[in-house]
Image: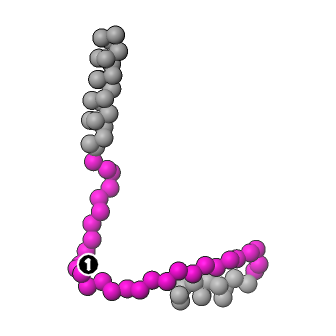
Amino acid sequence: MMRYITVLLFLTFSLLLFAEKKPPYEYYHLGNQADITSTTQSDIVLMGAGIDVDTAFQWMCNV
């Protein structure tokens, strides 16, 4: 019984050590985020296998 408790404690502490690892990426920003004023809009384009899709792509870029 003591062996199981020892193994359980070892696994618990091992998981805690791995949980505190730093992620392989960092978040950062440049400039002043307080002066950002942008509006967003959601749209959807349903496209099939046709050959004339240029208009749809132009519309998506302009939205």
Identify the residue at horizontal 27%, vertical 29% (top origin): 13
Identify the residue at horizontal 73%, vertical 84% (top origin): 52
Residue 39 in the figure: left or right of residue 32: right
Q: Is residue 46 magenta?
A: yes
Residue 14 in the figure: left or right of residue 46: left
Q: Give the SS element for disc 1.
A: helix
Residue 48 to residue 27: above or below: below
Task: Provide residue 59's location: percent of width, then percent of height.
Answer: 60, 88
Identify the residue at horizontal 29%, vertical 23% (top origin): 9
Task: Provide residue 43's location: percent of width, then percent of height.
Answer: 57, 81
Q: Quadrant of residue 35?
A: bottom left
Q: Quadrant of residue 49?
A: bottom right
Residue 18 to residue 51: above or below: above
Residue 52 to residue 11: above or below: below
Please name the predominant secondary structure of the magenta segment in the image. Answer: loop
- The amino acid beneath tag 1 is Gln
Q: Quadrant of residue 26?
A: bottom left
Task: Provide residue 30's location: percent of width, then percent of height.
Answer: 25, 74
Task: Provide residue 21's location: percent of width, then percent of height.
Answer: 28, 43
Identify the residue at horizontal 53%, vertical 87% (top origin): 63
Q: Nearer the viewer, residue 1 or 46?
A: 1
Q: Find the magenta span and give its range.
A: 22-51
Q: Is residue 27 magenta?
A: yes
What residue is disc 1 on? 33
Asked which colour scheme the image uses, the reply is: one colour
Residue found at the very far front of the displayed protein: 1
